[in-house]
Image (cartoon, helix red, strand yellow):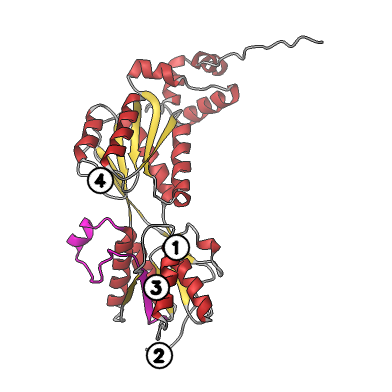
């Protein structure tokens, strides 16, 4: 029997890259750490060589020198729709990988005990930066996040603004999404547009001060609908999915709510406050024998399950891929300079038109 010989693979170092490119090791270090002072061409040249040679950053060694490991954290709520946030996580991880960082993900319940355990883990792992995804930071004493920044950790949040100067934030323009989708349907000739929303949505048009204090996406989408209808001089009709509890039951809730209504009057278009809401509407209309979009157009938000509808749903795509990338880049920038000016990013939705909507022409 032939003896097998195992050869230990040589570990590629920054020195190997420097020798390969005939440059000094300091230049290699700066390029791989995204430090300023090098041309983009040199940075790309070094990264390409590192990839070809099989270089992997030693996060443990980096941690010994800096007191922080080359690791970024994501804290995300367990009940958040995983399908929606998959694109957020993927783009966040890509940014981390591009900057030679690993990622730790903490799934938590929205309570203080769970969040404190996650924060303890982030500290123990000496992560360089952490993103708290929509909702997770709202039930947490703000002081805990402030203490993280004071310990030298880069921190940002998504879904709402944070007042501290060292905590960057990314918010989604929910109200504008509701406004744009409603105006799209109005432009298609629809005059009797119904909105199916979630308990907690305000049925009156709020002023700007009240809008700022609202963090509920369904409420803000409903507010965008109300504003667009008000500006067009059209009657509003907001129906609350009375049976609504928690996703993913929302589809059944909206289906049941419409079934109990029994009739839709002059309604020619229905907007669901999420794709779940809109799918429930599609199922109910099918049982009513109402053709979509020939008789009633249907639209939603998120672009999570929109392609599961028959027909596929017109929807406002939530910018989660962009949000994940932005969150990662904000952490990298904050890690370079903890005292840099605070960033407050507002990301717009994208309208995706599919087969569930069509023009409706009728007299005013």
| Residue assigned mark 3 | 257
Find numbered disc 3 in the image and state the secondary structure of the residue it sits on: helix
Mark 3 or 2: in front is: 3
Find numbered disc 4 in the image and state the secondary structure of the residue it sits on: loop
Find numbered disc 2 in the image and state the secondary structure of the residue it sits on: loop
Local crowd size for mark 2, using a 10 Å CA cut-off: few (<14), some (14–19), many (≥20): few
**Labels 3 & 4 near each other (Cβ < 8 A):** no
User: Residue 349, position in %: x, y?
Assistant: 40, 58
For residue 333, say whether it is visible. Answer: no
In the image, 259 versus 264, the foreground residue is 259
**Labels 1 & 4 near each other (Cβ < 8 A):** no
The residue stretch that appears in magenta:
190-216
User: Going by the image, does 205 lie left or right of 243?
Assistant: left
* Residue occupying image coordinates x 46% and y 37%: 93
Q: Earlier in the sequence, mark 3 or mark 4?
A: 4
| Residue assigned mark 4 | 139
* Residue occupying image coordinates x 54% and y 66%: 309
Q: CA distance from mark 3 to mark 4?
A: 31 Å
In the image, 100 versus 221, the foreground residue is 221
Q: Which mark is residue 276?
A: 1
């Amino acid at each position: 029997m032939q003896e097998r010989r195992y050869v230990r693979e040589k570990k590629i170092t920054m020195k190997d890259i420097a020798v390969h490119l005939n440059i000094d090791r300091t230049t290699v270090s700066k390029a791989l750490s995204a430090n300023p002072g090098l041309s983009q061409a040199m940075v790309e040249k070094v990264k390409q060589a590192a990839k070809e040679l099989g270089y992997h950053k030693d996060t443990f060694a980096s941690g010994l020198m800096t007191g922080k490991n080359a690791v970024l954290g994501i804290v995300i709520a367990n009940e958040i729709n995983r399908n929606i946030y998959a694109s957020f996580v993927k783009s966040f991880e890509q940014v981390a990988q591009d900057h030679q960082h690993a990622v730790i993900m903490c799934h938590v319940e929205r309570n203080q005990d769970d969040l404190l355990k996650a924060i303890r883990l982030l500290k123990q792992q000496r992560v360089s930066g952490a993103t708290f995804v929509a909702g997770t930071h709202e039930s947490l004493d703000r002081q805990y996040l402030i203490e993280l920044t004071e310990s030298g950790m880069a921190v940002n949040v998504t879904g709402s603004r944070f007042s501290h100067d060292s905590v960057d934030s990314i918010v989604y323009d929910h109200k504008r999404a509701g406004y744009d989708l409603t105006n799209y349907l109005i432009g298609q000739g629809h005059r009797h547009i119904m909105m199916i929303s979630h308990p907690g949505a305000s049925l009156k048009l709020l002023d700007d001060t009240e809008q700022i204090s609202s963090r509920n996406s369904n409420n803000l989408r409903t507010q965008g609908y109300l504003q667009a209808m008000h500006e067009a001089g059209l009657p509003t009709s907001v129906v609350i999915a009375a049976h609504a509890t928690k996703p993913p039951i929302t589809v059944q809730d909206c289906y049941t709510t419409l079934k109990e209504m029994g009739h839709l009057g002059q309604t020619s278009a229905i907007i669901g406050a999420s794709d779940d809401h809109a799918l429930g509407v599609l199922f109910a209309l099918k049982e009513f024998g109402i053709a979509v979009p020939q008789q009633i157009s249907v639209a939603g938000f998120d672009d999570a399950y929109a392609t599961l509808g028959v027909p596929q749903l017109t929807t406002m795509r939530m910018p989660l891929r962009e949000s994940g990338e932005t969150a990662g880049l904000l952490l990298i920038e904050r890690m370079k300079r903890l005292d840099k000016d605070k960033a407050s990013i507002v990301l717009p939705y994208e309208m995706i038109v599919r087969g569930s909507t069509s023009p409706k022409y009728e007299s005013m």
